[in-house]
Amino acid sequence: MTNKVEICGVNTSKLPVLTGAQMRQLFEAMRNGDQEARTQLINGNLRLVLSVIQRFTNRGEYMDDLFQVGCIGLIKAIDNFDLFQNVKFSTYAVPMIIGEIRRYLRDNNPIRVSRSLRDIAYKALQVRDSLVNKYSREPSINEIAGELNLPREEVVFALDAIQEPISLFEPIYHDGGDPIYVMDQISDEKNQDQNWLEGIAIKDALGKLSEREKLILTLRFFEGKTQMEVAEEIGISQAQVSRLEKAALHNMRKYL
């Protein structure tokens, strides 16, 4: 009992382990309509589901939910496994279990993606799996797009759309000291030293203008008002606003 771990009410320490010979006998019996053999195959391969869901432990999902979804993938693998193919059941089942879990995670993604994009992405993943089995290598995007008869860019966009978001505080490297997070690898173009220095220079240049010129530029470029609105606010014509604005910008350029 010391190693007991319960998922969905299943005591994982007591899950059975089937030998290759037992698996074959049960598959043959199941093909002949024995539903008890099917149940034994499911129970005898639950450890396979457990090993797969360990890959998804950092997604913030409940393990019970992932276990149940993984079991659906396992059942599909059992129902579709061909004994006469020269492949181990685990080799066949693991991708199906992973695919079922990934489909669940995508469908429950907080970022909503259109149905058409998801359909293209799912088809692309199915084609990718079939090409891997056919050529024993990772296919290129061009090959996947060719099989789907779609533009490469459309396939890339669809696959990007279903990628799950990650936290900026997700650690990507840890050597025993301070970890490096995703946010440490992302540049902030809005908050660079150059922009900061430019802000100081603009503020300094504004200080060299007359009060009227400063007011016009503040209303125009910091508050987003039109020349007509500025003219009405300070009581001059739009032509005068335009002339003063140009003169003020010309003066600022000398200081910048």
Image (cartoon, rainbow, N blue to C red):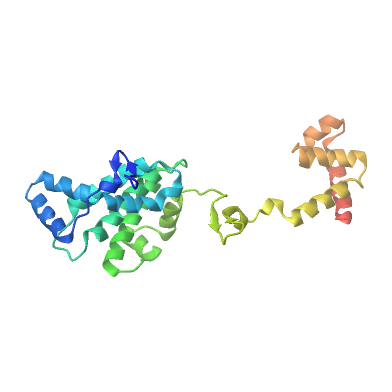
Residue name at image x 84 percent, y 39 percent? 216
242 or 164, which lies in front? 164
Image location of residue 137, percent across then percent down: 33, 69
Question: Which x, y percent locates residue 143?
Answer: 35, 65
> Looking at the image, which residue sits at the far front?
2
For the C terminus, which image quadrant? Answer: bottom right
Residue 38, horizontal then vertical, whole percent: 15, 47
Residue sitting nearer the eye, 48 or 158? 48
Residue at 89% from the left image edge and 54% from the top image edge:
255
Q: Quadrant of residue 149?
A: bottom left
Quadrant in which residue 174 is drawn:
bottom right
Viewer-proximal residue among 196 and 44: 44
Nearest to the observer: residue 13 or residue 106: 13
Residue drawn at (57%, 54%) of the image: 182
At a point 84% along the width and 52% down the height, the residue shown is 201
Residue 252 pos. (x, y %): 87, 51
Q: In the figure, 122 relative to 109: above or below?
A: below
Q: Is residue 34 left or right of residue 16?
A: left
**Quadrant location of the N terminus?**
top left
Instruction: Count all numbered tags in the image, as a single digit.
Output: 0
Q: Does 213 appear above or below 88?
A: above
